[in-house]
Amino acid sequence: MRELIISRKLMAIFLFVFLVTLIVGCTAARKPEPDANRNPAAQENQQAQTLAAEAARVEGVKEAYVVVSGNMALVGLSINRDVTDAETNRIKSEAGQRVQAADGQITDVRVSTDPDTVVRIRNIFNGIGQGRPLSSFETEITELVRRIAPTKEQ
């Protein structure tokens, strides 16, 4: 009788160990979360999103898009229709200052409210957000840099 109780206990322990091993061994391996510190594209994308959010905080701005290339930021602003030229200049200047203040690495800010230019900046911003490398937009960025004058500090 005593051997039967010991035998059942051993069988229960064996079954428990077997089930635990089976459960642990069959769980799916988890992929590590992407680390933005190891992925420069993800880091640049996050930086651009943060700067765009900062530029969008300026009164009169409906939407903002930012493309960061080195120490330069291209900023495209979609502004309210009823904004005067004087207000547009104030908005561009303030957005440029906010972007520069939000990231000390940025030394050259170029802001545009021209609808066609804003669409081009938005397309680059969205392309980078979808995982395309910044280098695939090199020609377009060079063209935009030539078109947009640097924002003046006030």
Image (spheres, rainbow, N blue to C red):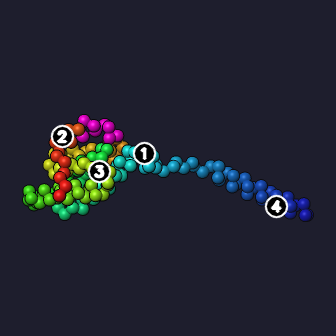
Q: Which numbered disc flags the more N-terminal residue, 2 or 1?
A: 1
Q: Which mark is residue 106?
A: 3
Looking at the figure, which quarter contains the N terminus?
bottom right
Q: Which numbered disc flags the more N-terminal residue, 3 or 1?
A: 1
Residue 21 is a magenta residue: no
Label 2: which residue?
Answer: 146
Crowding around mark 4 (Cα neighbors within 10 Å: few <14, some 14 to 19, many 20+) is few
Q: Which numbered disc flags the more N-terminal residue, 1 or 4?
A: 4
Residue shown at 36% from the left, 52% from the top: 46
**Mark 2 in CB contact with mark 4 (< 8 angstroms):** no
Q: CA distance from mark 3 to mark 2?
A: 18 Å
* Magenta span main SS: helix
Q: Which numbered disc flags the more N-terminal residue, 2 or 4?
A: 4
Residue 85: x %, y % from top left: 8, 56
Label 4: which residue?
Answer: 9
Q: Which mark is residue 39?
A: 1
Say whether residue 22 is left or right of residue 114: right
Q: Which residues are magenta?
A: 133-141
Mark 3, mark 2: which one is toward the viewer? 3
Mark 4, mark 3: which one is toward the viewer? 3
